[in-house]
Image (cartoon, rainbow, N blue to C red):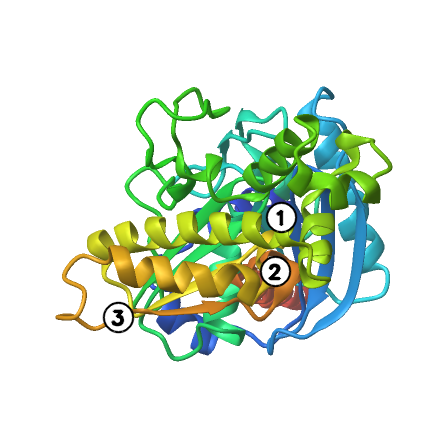
Amino acid sequence: MSTYRDFTHRGSARATVLRTVGTRERRSHLTAPRVPTVGIDIGGTKVMAGVVDADGNILERLRTETPDKSKSPKVVEDTIVELVLDLSDRHDVHAVGIGAAGWVDADRNRILFAPHLSWRNEPLRDRLAGRLAVPVLVDNDANAAAWAEWRFGAGRGEDHLVMITLGTGIGGAILEDGQVKRGKFGVAGEFGHMQVVPGGHRCPCGNRGCWEQYSSGNALVREARELAAADSPVAYGIIEHVKGNISDISGPMITELAREGDAMCIELLQDIGQWLGVGIANLAAALDPSCFVIGGGVSAADDLLIAPARDAFRRHLTGRGYRPEARITRAQLGPEAGMVGAADLARLVARRFRRANRRRVERYERYERYAEARRGAKGTL
């Protein structure tokens, strides 16, 4: 006979629910429960957590530094748990979504590889689900950001959308008919490692000439530092700005100086933008989306970057002049996109978890009625 423990054993039931997450996201999000969920965005330098409502509004956010990558994965897991528990003290949280900067398997459980953290085939979802009292969903951070832009930002109304995130490297995601296209093994959208220059700059992935070596935050900083180290006359402005400490040159600094009119910084952003346009043209030839959304920290340069990207895109687009051109636009949600998207995707799991929990409660109530009837029958004997 079933016991009370059978009906209230949460761990195994939660794991079963998490394994039932479907792929029909477009239909699902329309009927997902309008409950608050937590989104976690894990990057190489920061972990950002926030409570997000069903309309994409951030009710509260927390931020902390990412533990050093030389530490064990458990240290990062502990940080996530602490943030979720802190937020749960003040909000009724129904699910947690994780957007991780790394390759996530097709089941959205394991982090196969994270370049900036010590995660190698780590079952992050199951480990966190075992420590938290709510269901957990894990996805790639670019997938989460693209979902947020499609639901609440620059991609609203688009049926075929490609998002490109320009940060330290280049991430990406594909949405088609309201579904994130993750590929057979879950690692689709790694656009940054398309090889655009045979034998070009060495990439941390092990190859040469990857796109992110020519159009990313790292590429921008590398070019500026090389010019400064060579004591180039065009770099005198930025050398003076950092008082000769070339290692202090950063991407946001270059963008700031470009806005102030520094000729070298403007030219560097134009170069990055042109390479961005070349890569977008290649993606358009392969995927033919209606819209490209450009996000990530480097996109803060706005038209200093986007305008040359649009020009290069038109010059390199296959069949230019004889085909419709995709719209290229900057993301609207800024650095919170990954967090918002992860929380919204988690809301789909919350619905399934709530249904399963309701069925368990109903079964327990039936058992209680049955037990009460048995006790009553014995009392009349």
- Seen at 78% across and 61% down, the residue is 61
Q: Position of residue 330 (x, y in %)?
A: 51, 67
* Disc 3 secondary structure class: loop
Residue type, numbered disc 2: Ala
Neighbor class of circle 1 (other Cα within 10 Å; few <14, some 14-19, many 20+) is many
Neighbor class of circle 3 (other Cα within 10 Å; few <14, some 14-19, many 20+) is some
Label 2 or label 1, whichever lies nearer to me, is: 1
Distance, label 2 to label 1, CA atoms, is 14 Å
Query: Which mark is first along the chain, 3 or 2?
Result: 2
Query: Which residue is disc 1 drawn over?
Result: 264
Distance, label 1 to label 3, CA atoms, is 31 Å
Residue type, numbered disc 1: Met
Question: Residue 334 sits in which quadrant?
Answer: bottom right
Label 1 or label 3, whichever lies nearer to me, is: 1
Neighbor class of circle 2 (other Cα within 10 Å; few <14, some 14-19, many 20+) is many
With respect to residue 56, does 347 lie above or below? Answer: above
* Residue 173 appears in the picture as rendered: yes
Q: Position of residue 374 (x, y in %)?
A: 59, 62
Left or right of 209, for residue 269: right
Distance, label 2 to label 3, CA atoms, is 23 Å
Query: Which residue is disc 3 drawn over?
Result: 325
**Label of residue 180 in the image:** none
Query: Which mark is first along the chain, 3 or 1?
Result: 1
Q: Nearer the viewer, residue 214 or 21?
A: 214
Q: Position of residue 272 (x, y in %)?
A: 49, 48
Check the picture and name the quadrant holding the C terminus: bottom right
Left or right of 286, for residue 94: right
Q: Nearer the viewer, residue 93 or 43?
A: 43
* Disc 1 secondary structure class: helix
